[in-house]
Image (spheres, rainbow, N blue to C red):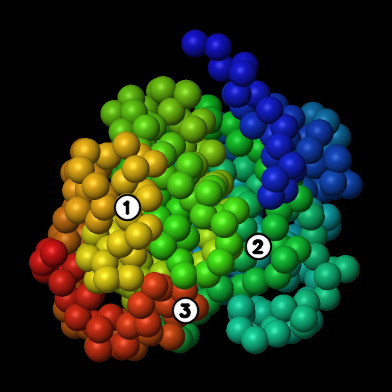
Amino acid sequence: MDLNRYRMNWNYPTSMRVGVGRINELAEACRQLGMRAPLLCTDPGLAALPMIDAALRQCRDAGLKAGLFSAIKGNPTGANVMDGVAAFKAGGHDGVIAFGGGSALDAGKAIALMVGQDRPLWDFEDVGDNASRVKVAGMAPVVAVPTTAGTGSEVGRASVITDDAAHIKRIIFHVRMLPALVILDPELTVGLPAKITAATGMDALSHSLEAFCSPLFHPMAEGIALEGMRLVQQYLPRAVSQGSDVEARLQMLVASSMGATAFQRGLGAMHALAHPLGALYDAHHGLLNAVLMPYVLVANRGAIEPQMEKMARYLALPGSGFAAVLDWVLALRSEVGIAHSLGEIGIDDTRIEQVGRMAEVDPSAGTNPIAFSAAQYSALFDKALRGLL
């Protein structure tokens, strides 16, 4: 197989270097953005792996004063971000390498934002015109290097950060939070365990699927979402069952970036529920979306039948319309080992009403095809908890 045909430079939605071995261009990428002393932000698990040592060594051999910050939780917190800001300033850094899964990418982007601000982090939550408060000149440049194919945060203009005090996930947003340069190297994802590959891959699917079902007018995002879902259909089972399949790994990285590009059109009830559940139960975001997916589809059925007809045709599914899509989602989840109910992954029923209230006001709820009430979100959560489709 000739993987060189996948070696490309893209400029949508930002500058992207795609292909096997592109991580060897990390130091040059930092220099291109004017960095002399980048801070590599990652999670503790990755920090112990050879790929991080190699990245730091590459930067230092190129004359860059590279530092490391890895105190980032699976659901990054405001405290993690501000600890990263302190490390950035203490080390005299001038840019960020956000290296890892969604947590490291989100935290790294938020750190790069906050190093030049004099307001608290939550003042930049994606509410109203809060983004206008940002001192853009103080923001640090970011090179993003994803090691999972799921969140697509490398091409996103926001970070999802947990407010521990309020037990809620908040979206921090500014258009300049979009990393200036992205490296998509599939070899960095080859060692990812099958369970994480499955959960993150289903997260990529959830982004494209919810964007495709959004009622907003954005034909470009709709088209990207369709192709992103086709890539997941074709390559996620391969990536899960054959972890060393570099082509499948690359295509899933692309599908992940496409999903996050598509959700400029909006998300929906999957994310409106996954955000409070992640904040309250510290559960894996991608896994939550994967489990919630069929329950949300069923709840939205009355408003998404036309989209499901188009999706079934594009994916060449057996059958037609909504039923074909639901059957495919259920079969895919089963094939890659996703649990059928939230109860199976440790979520309990003690906060049903609270989750419903939080989901109703989550920003993602605003573009769900149906405006669910808090009570309807609670009922939807209860069905997913007990596995009742």
- Label 1 or label 3, whichever lies nearer to me, is 1
Density class for disc 3 (Cα within 10 Å; few <14, some 14-19, many ≥20) is some
Q: Amino acid at mark 3?
A: Gly
Q: Amino acid at mark 2?
A: Arg
Q: Earlier in the sequence, mark 1 or mark 3?
A: 1
- Label 2 or label 3, whichever lies nearer to me, is 3
SS state under label 1: helix
Q: Earlier in the sequence, mark 2 or mark 3?
A: 2
- Label 2 or label 1, whichever lies nearer to me, is 1
Density class for disc 1 (Cα within 10 Å; few <14, some 14-19, many ≥20) is some
Q: Residue 368: give x, y in percent of width and height.
A: 41, 73
Image height check: is 354 above or below 255?
A: below
- How far apart, in angstroms, are the residues tagged by discs 1 and 3? 23 Å
| Mark linked to residue 309 | 1
Q: Nearer the viewer, residue 379 or 319?
A: 319
Q: Residue 100: give x, y in percent of width and height.
A: 55, 46
- Residue occupying image coordinates x 72% and y 66%: 175
Left or right of 136 on screen, residue 151: left
Q: Amino acid at mark 1?
A: Glu
- Residue occupying image coordinates x 32% and y 88%: 373
Disc 2: which residue: 157
Q: Nearer the viewer, residue 274 or 86?
A: 274
Disc 3: which residue: 366
| Quadrant of the snapshot with the C terminus | bottom left
SS state under label 3: helix
Would residue 60 be visible to someone looking at this image? no
Q: Residue 228: give x, y in percent of width and height.
A: 47, 44
